């Protein structure tokens, strides 16, 4: 990914747009993949509470 300022990165994280926004979103998917997997495994092991 190209170098962008912290301010621009913050803007893109809040509201991705354009080519840079697409790259930021793709990078977030890669860097957050382990967290997503952990949360999904955790939720699969929880009991469902029925009211």
Image (cartoon, rainbow, N blue to C red):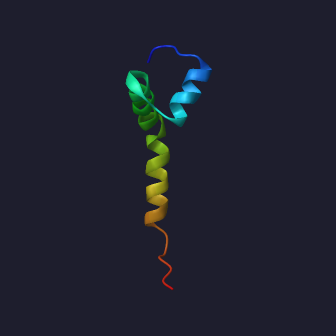
In the picture as drawn, the residue positioned furthest to the right comes out as: 7
Classify 15 as above or below 8.
below
**Residue 46 location (% of width, % of height):** 49, 70
The residue located at (44%, 58%) in the rendering is 41
Which residue is nearer to you in this view: 47 or 49?
Answer: 49
Which residue is nearer to you in this view: 18 or 23?
Answer: 18
Q: Point out the image quarter for the N terminus.
A: top left
In the picture as drawn, the residue positioned furthest to the top comes out as: 3
The image quarter in which residue 21 lies: top left
**Residue 19 location (% of width, % of height):** 38, 22
**Residue 8 location (% of width, % of height):** 56, 22
In the picture as drawn, the residue positioned furthest to the bottom comes out as: 51
**Residue 22 location (% of width, % of height):** 39, 28
The residue located at (39%, 25%) in the rendering is 18
| Number of marks drawn | 0
The image quarter in which residue 7 lies: top right
Classify 7 as above or below 34.
above
The residue located at (46%, 48%) in the rendering is 36
The residue located at (50%, 35%) in the rendering is 15
């Amino acid at each position: 990914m190209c170098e962008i300022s912290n301010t621009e990165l913050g803007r893109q994280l809040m509201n991705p747009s354009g080519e840079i926004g697409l790259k930021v979103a793709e990078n977030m998917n890669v860097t957050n993949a382990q967290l997503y997997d952990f949360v999904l495994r955790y939720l699969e092991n929880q009991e469902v509470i029925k009211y």
